[in-house]
Image (cartoon, rainbow, N blue to C red):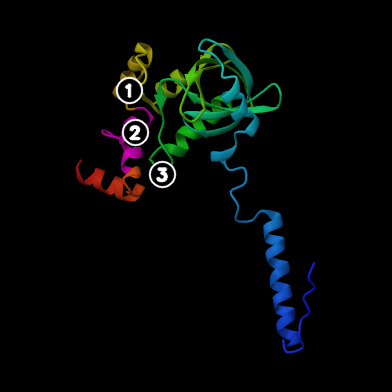
Amino acid sequence: MKKVILKNTLPAKKIAVHFLFFVIAFLISSCGFGSSGNSEENVISSAGNDTIKKQPPAIGDTIAGKVVAVIDGDTYDVLVPGDTTLRVRMEGIDAPEKGMAFNKVAKKYLSDLCFGKNVNVLVTGIDGHRRVLGFTFVDDTLELSHEMIKAGYAWHFKKYSKDTDLAVLEQDARKAEKGLWFDKNPIAPWEFRKLMRQGNTAEEIYREHNKNQ
């Protein structure tokens, strides 16, 4: 390795400043400041991705595990045997996205229902993001998709679901003005995502939406 010799033309004080700067930068990178780390959007383990890719669960299978993270009102992470984390997208519903009204309330409601609890997921498929799609049962009786619709914290995702029970529950929540249905004409999550992909900010989307009310 070639040895680099500092010449005396560089003042000692300047060398000290550069050294201090290097130490600070090293400490920051070592502690992980500024990195994404295990954010809510990136909790799923690589083992979970490999499992879904190599041996995806079949429709009708039941996955048992413990809910270890709630991402939003329709998505959570479940820890299954083998110390593997799978991401579950709840069947038949679409909850408010980040930046939307009721996003935090819906997330908290789902957290209160299932976080830290053992669940059974009845698999209905795998989506394009390698998330398990399914109905989630807590204590073998409480089904989470139905509970979120019933409380008014999610839409029935009619584009992908023909479930008549979910459709009726949404109509009941609308009539009772529960949750997000307190707003007479809330923005649907799929419309919000479409507008975000077009380059709009959440603030711009709501400003335009409110003008048209």
- Residue receiving disc 3: 99
- Which badge, 2 or 3, comes first in the chain's sequence? 3
In the rendered structure, does residue 191 fall within the stretch colored magenta?
Answer: yes
Crowding at dot 3, Cα within 10 Å, few <14 / some 14-19 / many 20+, comes out as few
Horizontally, is 200 left or right of 15 in the view? Answer: left
**Residue reaching furthest to the front:** 2
The quarter of the rendered structure image containing the C terminus is top left
In the picture, the quarter occupied by the N terminus is bottom right
Q: Amino acid at mark 2?
A: Trp
Which tag, 2 or 1, sits closer to the chain's start? 1
Q: From which residue to which does the magenta span run? A: 178-195
Q: Are marks 2 and 1 in contact (CB under 8 Å)?
A: yes
The nearer-to-camera label among 2 and 3 is 2
In percent of width and height, residue 199 lies at 33, 49
Please name whichever residue, 3 or 157, is drawn nearer the observer in this view of the structure. Answer: 3
Q: Is residue 1 above or below residue 148?
A: below
Callout 3: SS:
loop
Looking at the image, tell me whether mark 1 or mark 3 is earlier in sequence order.
3
Q: Nearer the viewer, mark 1 or mark 3?
A: 1
Residue wearing tag 1:
159
Above or below 102: residue 147 = above
Tell me which corner region of the image, top left, top right, bottom left or bottom right, holds residue 47. top right
Residue linked to disc 2: 190
Toward which corner of the image does residue 93 lie, by quadrant?
Answer: top left
Q: CA distance from mark 1 to mark 3?
A: 22 Å
C-alpha gap between disc 2 and disc 1: 10 Å
- Residue 152 position, x and y percent, is 39, 26
**Residue at point 41%, 44% (across, down):** 99
Is the C-beta separation of discs 2 and 3 under 8 Å?
no
